[in-house]
Image (cartoon, rainbow, N blue to C red):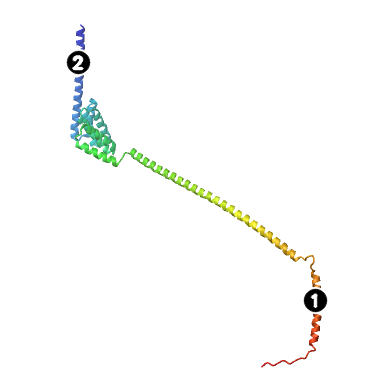
Amino acid sequence: MKQVKHIFILLCTVSIAFAQNKEAEQIKQESNRFTYKANQALKENSFSDAEAEYRKAISKDGENAAAKYNLGNAYYTNESYTEAFKRYKQASEVALTKAEKHSAYHNMGNIFMKNKEYEKAVAAYKNALRNNPTDDETRYNLALAKDMLEKNPPKDDQDKEDKDKKDQKKEDEDKKDNEDKKDNKDKNKDEGDKEKDKGGKDDKDKDGEGDKEKEKNKKDNKNDTENADQKDDKKQQQQPKPNQLSPQQIKSLLQAMNNAEKKTQDKLNEKKGKAIKVKAEKDW
């Protein structure tokens, strides 16, 4: 009985799985039919009909990578790049083959290039080449993206580069300021030492001048003393000595001598008056 029970359960499980697989297969088939209709509408340049059918296909089967990828192409052709990128990304997430992944990443790289997001474009093309390393078009686009990235670095990188340059400039300026301050400090120190030496020399000169001044004052004092002594000597010479005649006495004596001399002269004159006068010889 138990063995029959296990067989019954197994048959039920298989039946359920078979039914589920059949249902899933039917879902895929319906989704593929919508995709086919969308492709046909796209060939007829009926974008709105194609978009509607692709949406039905995706709604029916969320793993329909072809429908998502083809809808992305439709948006890309219609220059709706945001919607196109969204569908390419969805396709890359559900793609079962490398070829499908390669195509999705390649087209995402193209959208990044149009948006000038070169760093993201490089990453997308690299992912595409990981799934198909032999694709020359992807390789060319990758080289172009790298070249554009080098010429147009991301804003963050540019800001970082500008900041680094600014920081380096500030560092150089600070270094120069420190060197200038050090030079000024050394210069002030040298000038201070010179001023100190000069001050010492001035003090020395001042001391020397002070000594000279003292020597001069000493000499002047000596000269003053000698002059005073000379004045005293002269004064002493002008003063009468104890046994010397006074000026009045000398005057009286001179007057007496003059009177005596006058008397003698008068006598001589009286004798000359009595002598014989002679004529004087003529001159030729």
Specify the amino acid type for callout 1: Met
Is 119 located above or below residue 275 in the figure?
above
Q: Are marks 2 and 1 in contact (CB under 8 Å)?
A: no
Q: Nearer the viewer, mark 2 or mark 1?
A: 1
Crowd tier of the residue under label 2, counting other residues whose Cα lies within 10 Å: few below 14, some 14–19, many 20 or above: few
| Depth check, front residue: 272 or 107 | 272
Is 79 located above or below residue 211 in the figure?
above
Specify the amino acid type for callout 2: Val
Could you say whether the residue bearing mark 2 is in a helix, strand or loop? Answer: helix
| Depth check, front residue: 225 or 188 | 225
Indicate which disc, 2 or 1, sits on the residue closer to the N terminus: 2
Look at 46% across and 45% down and name the residue there.
182
Q: Position of residue 240 (x, y in %)?
A: 77, 66
Residue underneath mark 2: 14
The disc at residue 257 is 1
Q: Quadrant of residue 49?
A: top left
Q: From this viewpoint, is residue 80 visible?
A: no
Q: Quadrant of residue 138?
A: top left
